[in-house]
Image: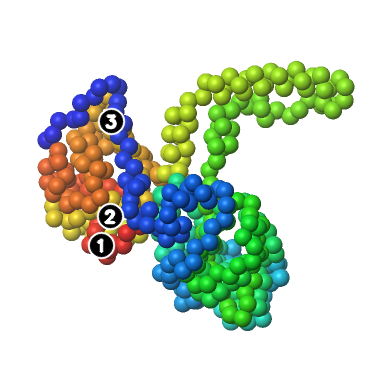
Amino acid sequence: MAACLPLADEFQTAQHAHGATDPDDIAALVRCVGDVDAFATEHWGRAPLVRRDADRFGDLLDLRAVDQLLGSVAQPPSFRVVRDGDTLPAVDVTRTVRLAGRDLEHVADLGRIAAQIEAGATLVLQGLQRTWLPIARFCRRLERATSHAVQANAYLSPAGSRGLARHFDNHDVIVLQLWGEKAWDVDGLGALRLAAGDVMYLPTGTEHSAATGDAPSLHLTVGLLRDTYRSLVERALADPRLDDPLPLGYADDVGRGRLVDELRERLAGAIDALASADPGALAADAAHRATTRRRPLMTGQLRSILGLADLDHTTRLRRRIDQPATLTVRADGTARLEMSDRTIDLPAVAVTGAHFVLDRTELAVGEIPGLDESGRAVLARRLVREGLLEVVDAAAGDVS
């Protein structure tokens, strides 16, 4: 067996940001914004953008998928129905069904929902990054491409309908027009109409309203929950005294003097904290949180697990693209493998093999170095069970 990796210090850490610059991740962002460099310098967090006939997005969601989502025992808050800016009571769009011998309340009633839509209401499908796999995968790719958290809602409106009142969102929004047309009135852009294949980007705080004309509409709003420099600065100011209440009576003459003294002391502490803050450490912490905020999708996991009994040296394995991993080798040669949702310990003999696995997108079990045939199989099965790898054949071509 191969020797343990040499240790230059007490331990070594290797971080494998698998998929961070995956071309498919960038392609997902390009579908939305076009030239990524131009978008980053001219629009990101600054100004709205409209792209005409950018792409067809039927692979993400269509009317058949909407029917399927609602027919799969959907319950609020995975959907709501809105009319004139107000959400209709659940009783108007749901029913009670019998499931496994028990009553399940507030299940989507497609008949009632369809009747409400026909009468002018808008159906809102919420949290699709959790409930619809094509959109979940798309959002994960956008998260990896942008490093910001992503969510998605869909809006289905009949002709002549206005869903939400004029408003702004507390996050950036990318609107993908999936089907039909919708008229918008947007600060900075004025009145415009989006047709199927059009895309619009709205920075945080951009006021807008939307309504359908003579035809119905289905559009997807992709929300980018952007991290900010303010959040990093606030982390650097981790002085619990900043959360103390202002002194009692701080607005009167006596209290104001005390407020000045205490504020001077806290400002001095804040200045010291900012002066001593390590930008590299703050950036590393932000990057770690960005890559570990979501659990992996785990598509194909059941098939992978059930196929482990047939695993041999020819079995091909694939890294889960949304599962980052950091391997830390301890002074005694053993290792700690940290993933987004769990941490596992590995013996010293598995370290070389673990490094090999983490540095590849796809591999055969027999290629894993540093172990005999039995050891390779043990390591491979462990990493499949823990969600780092999936069996290629069992996944039937699915890529997260």
Q: Quadrant of residue 262?
A: top right
How far from the left and from the top, in percent, is residue 279? 47, 28
Q: Are marks 3 and 1 in contact (CB under 8 Å)?
A: no
Residue positioned 36% across, 46% down in the render:
20
Q: Earlier in the sequence, mark 3 or mark 2?
A: 3
Within-10-Å neighbours for mark 1: few <14, some 14–19, many 20+: some
Is residue 384 among the parts visible in the rendering? no
Q: Give, as a three-letter code, the residue at label 2.
A: Glu
Task: Please give the name of the residue rendered at 76% of the width and 28% of the height, measured from the top-left corner.
Answer: 246
Q: Nearer the viewer, residue 340 or 268?
A: 268
Q: Tell me the element at label 3.
A: strand
Compared with residue 309, is residue 279 higher up or lower down, i.e. above or below? above
Image position of 252 (left or right of 65)? right
Specify few, some or many for label 2: CA neighbours under 10 Å numbering under 14, 14-19, or 20 or more: many
14 or 20: nearer the viewer: 20
Pick the residue in front: 9 or 97: 9
Coordinates of residue 202 in the picture (x, y in percent): 57, 56
Badges 3 and 2: C-beta atoms under 8 Å apart? no
Identify which residue, 104 or 338, lies in the foreground.
Answer: 338
How many angstroms separate mark 3 from mark 1 (CA)?
A: 31 Å
Looking at the image, residue 371 sits to the left or right of residue 197; the answer is left
Q: Quadrant of the N terminus?
A: top left
Residue at 66% over, 75% down: 161
User: Of callouts 3 and 1, which one flags the residue occurring earlier in the amino acid sequence?
Assistant: 3
Q: Which residue is mark 1?
A: 394
Q: How many marks?
A: 3
Label 2 secondary element: strand
Three-letter amino acid code of the residue under disc 3: Val
Badge 2 is on which residue?
390
Inter-mark Cα distance, 3 to 2: 24 Å
Q: Amino acid at mark 1?
A: Ala
Residue indicated by mark 3: 329
